[in-house]
Image (cartoon, rainbow, N blue to C red):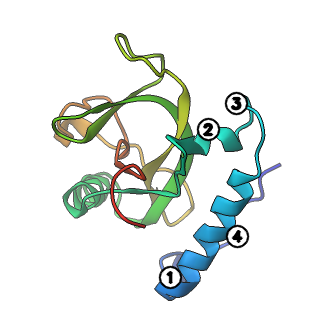
Amino acid sequence: MALKWPFTRERVSKLGDLFSLAEIKDFTNKFKTEVGLAKGQDSLAAKFVVNGEVRNGEFFGIDKVNQLITLAKAKSSSISGIRVYYGLAHESFDGSTSESKIAISPLKGVNDSTLRPRLFLVAVDADGKDIEIDATGFKDAPDGNGVGNGSPQPPFGSA
């Protein structure tokens, strides 16, 4: 059962802590180790293993993050942060551009239609509620309210 939003408007925009890169790498290495221990293709942890490597993050371009913030500010005067949702999506990669495509159902013409972990960013107001925005400003996502389909790390990027 989810707890009620416990933060005051003054505190909510300051949530989160800074960590050194070494500490973050330690956190992610623990995650990789735990996922590596998973057995069986049907386990959730096994979905994090892609081509023998453990997926440990996702990169989002600053322009898309800023676009989300701008659209949310136009909708709500009390944007206080961004919530990151975990999700599972069917994905494919374009070898020529190294970009991915994700969908809620299996993609046609794709050999591997396994659900893979993906991250989704949504703007949040000072009361802890997701801000529903008019996403017509998002290219190719006219009915969305957040940012998804970043660049999975790995296969792309060095984490």
Circle number at residue 137: none
Count neighbours of disc 4 (C-alpha within 10 A) and say few if under 14, some if 14 to 19, many if 20 or more.
few
Kindly state the secondary structure of the residue where label 3 is placed: loop
Residue corresponding to mark 2: 47
* Amino acid at pointer 1: Lys
Mark pair 2, 3: CA separation: 7 Å
Identified at 48% across, 57% down, the residue is 57
Circle number at residue 41: 3
* Amino acid at pointer 2: Lys
Q: Is residue 101 left or right of residue 40?
A: left
* Amino acid at pointer 3: Gln
Residue corresponding to mark 1: 14
- Indicate which label's residue lies in the foreground, 4 or 3: 3
Circle number at residue 6: 4
- Indicate which label's residue lies in the foreground, 4 or 1: 1
Mark pair 4, 1: CA separation: 13 Å
The x and y percentages for residue 80 are: 44, 69
Identified at 74% across, 35% down, the residue is 43
Instruction: Give the mark nearer the N terminus: 2 vs 3.
Output: 3
Q: Is residue 11 left or right of residue 34?
A: left
Instruction: Give the mark nearer the N terminus: 4 vs 3.
Output: 4
